[in-house]
Image: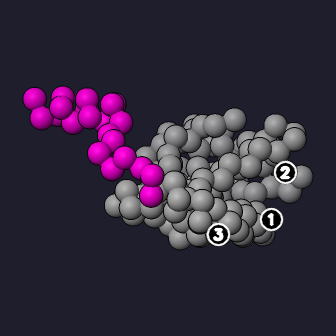
């Protein structure tokens, strides 16, 4: 169930900016569980935003997403596991959300998997990077730039 359409990339466990992504290939991990749930970079971004903002609505503002998308993603995460990932406290005063100890462990495990995958794939990615056509530009991006210049 995908609600967040943001991208978060890591190379060997380090967050990458736009310029970095142009320089290096990366491995993006999406974990699909047998019960139908999933966990990936978008979920990680939401958890980090909730940790900082201490509310779902605050996280939605930080991420530039609708509150509904953030709430549905939070609900899906909490239903995927036996223990909640995000604890919510409804109410206008004193309300909010926080990452549970299980949620913190989930993030740590995901980052460990991501780091191991990045390290394991490094040589293969370097070989693929060596064979790239550096002049390639996705058609949609080129069309958007032409439209913006016109």
Residue occupied by mark 1: 102
In the rendered image of this protein, does residue 3 appear above or below residue 97? above
Mark 1 secondary-structure assignment: helix
Q: Is residue 144 magenta?
A: yes
Which residue sits furthest left? 150
> Which of pointers 1 and 3 indicates the residue nearer the eye?
3
Q: Which residues are magenta?
A: 130-150
x and y percent of residue 91 in the render?
64, 51
Q: CA distance from mark 1 to mark 2?
A: 9 Å
Residue 22 rendering spot, x and y as whole percentages? 37, 56
Q: Secondary structure at mark 3?
A: helix
Instruction: Using a 10 Å C-alpha cutoff, classify the residue at mark 3 as few (fewer than 14 neighbours), some (14 to 19) or many (20 or more).
Output: some
The quarter of the image holding the C terminus is top left
Q: Nearer the viewer, residue 62 or 128?
A: 128
Quadrant of the rendered image containing residue 87: bottom right
Indicate yes or no whether the magenta region holds residue 29.
no
Residue at screen point 78% across, 49% down: 78
Decide if residue 124 is on the left or right side of residue 84: left
Q: Say which residue label 2 marks.
A: 81
C-alpha separation, residue under disc 3 versus residue under disc 2: 28 Å
- Residue at 50% x, 46% y is 6
Residue underneath mark 3: 119
Q: Tell me whether the residue at label 1 lies in contact with that at label 2, contact meaning CB atoms closer than 8 angstroms.
A: yes
């Amino acid at each position: 169930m995908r609600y967040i359409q943001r991208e978060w990339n890591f190379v060997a466990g380090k967050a990458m900016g736009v310029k970095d992504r142009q320089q290096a290939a990366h491995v993006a991990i999406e974990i699909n569980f047998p019960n139908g749930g999933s966990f990936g970079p978008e979920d990680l971004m939401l958890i980090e935003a909730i940790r900082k903002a201490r509310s779902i609505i605050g996280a939605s503002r930080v991420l530039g997403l609708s509150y509904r998308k953030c709430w549905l993603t939070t609900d899906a995460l909490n239903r995927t596991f036996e223990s909640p990932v995000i604890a919510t406290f409804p109410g206008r005063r004193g309300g909010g959300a926080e990452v549970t100890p299980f949620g913190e462990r989930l993030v740590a495990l995901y980052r460990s998997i991501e780091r191991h995958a990045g390290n394991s794939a490094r040589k293969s990615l370097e070989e693929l990077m060596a064979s790239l056509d550096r002049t390639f530009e996705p058609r949609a991006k080129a069309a958007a730039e032409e439209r913006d210049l016109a």
